[in-house]
Image: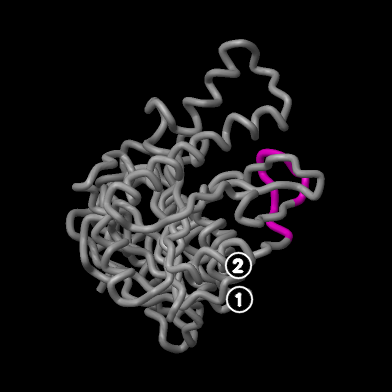
Amino acid sequence: MNIIVQKYGGTSLREISNKSKFLFHIRECINKGNKLVVVVSAIGRKGEAYATDTLIEQLEKISSKINPKKKDLIMSCGEIISAATIGHLLDSENIPCEVLTGYQAGILTDDNFTKSKILNIDTSIINKYLNQNKVVVVAGFQGKTIKDEITTLGRGGSDTTAVALGSYLKADRVDIFTDVEGVAFIDPNLIKNPKYIKEISYDDMYKLAINGVSVLHPRAVMIGKEYDTKIQIRSTNLKKKGTIVTNLDNQKTNKVLGIAIKNENNKTIISVLFNNIYRDTIIKKASEYINKEYKKSQRNIDVIYDQDKVSFIIDCNQLYYHINKLYNLFSN
């Protein structure tokens, strides 16, 4: 029997009932004879009752000066609420399960509170329940120090939890379920029906992640690479396989990996990330685009050429004008 780890983000858990979309994926995985670990984030996003930012606000109402240990205590609650609720739902659906906090699951971290690093995972408790044919639901984003102090893992902590557990458990695959169908060539909120990437290497996924593509945290990618753990990014709402992140030969990657967007100092940075084998071709295309736009408007576009990306620096209000043109130019 293969071990599969599934991670569900906060938006996937907004509706928890017997009609929840994630139940389909859990049942499908079990019915295929797999052992299953489910890692959960806090429910919802900022402003919603159990979201991490909402919990922090309870302390900030008293004082903005917060002891990091106490901040970790309250931040860990959102994922625990999710895990308990999901566990109760599985019970009600007659799916045998056990619910574990991150520290009960054996996740040992350093004592860098609010942004701790995983040092080791004792998988014996999880394996015990898996061998009893139970789904193990684990609260993501958290662990404990050697002194049994509760810690959290910082931004993207549930992704990190899922990939780390998959790595230590030697899982066949880690599925990261989100509200998009995989890694898009560009933010699907900016371009309608963009291309999606079917398969990408750890290194290329890391490049996208550190440049603003937020579907998978960079730390999770690097853990996957270290242990050669296959990661699949999928939509909770669809049956599609999504994007596979794996040990892919650099020669097989696309010329252009994707387009990432960041806002800094009242400017928008549009970065076209590419396989550096094709650098000369991409730089030529970028230069031709800049010259063409200058002839139209007599306005310079600031640009930075790096080894594996070219970044266009524009005014924020010009984003939609340039993004459509750059997508059409580089996605073909």
The residue nearer to you, when weighing 216 against 122, is 122
Looking at the image, the residue that sits furthest to the right is: 147
The residue nearer to you, when weighing 187 against 177, is 177
Q: Which residues are magenta?
A: 110-119
Residue at image mark 1: 227
Percent across and percent down for residue 128 are 57, 66
User: Chief secondary structure of the magenta span?
Assistant: loop
Total marks shown come to 2
Horizontally, residue 52 falls left or right of residue 189, namely right
Circle 1 SS class: helix
Classify mark 1: residues with Cα within 10 Å, few (<14), some (14-19) or many (20+): some
The residue nearer to you, when weighing 126 against 47, is 126
Q: Which mark is residue 223?
A: 2
Q: Residue visible at 21% across and 66% down?
A: 239
Marks 2 and 1 close (CB-CB < 8 Å): yes
Q: Give yes or no for residue 113 being in the magenta stretch.
A: yes
Q: Give yes or no for residue 103 being in the magenta stretch.
A: no
Percent across and percent down for residue 73 are 64, 32
Can residue 311 be seen from the camera position used here?
Answer: no
Q: Quadrant of residue 174?
A: bottom left
* Amino acid at dot 2: Ile
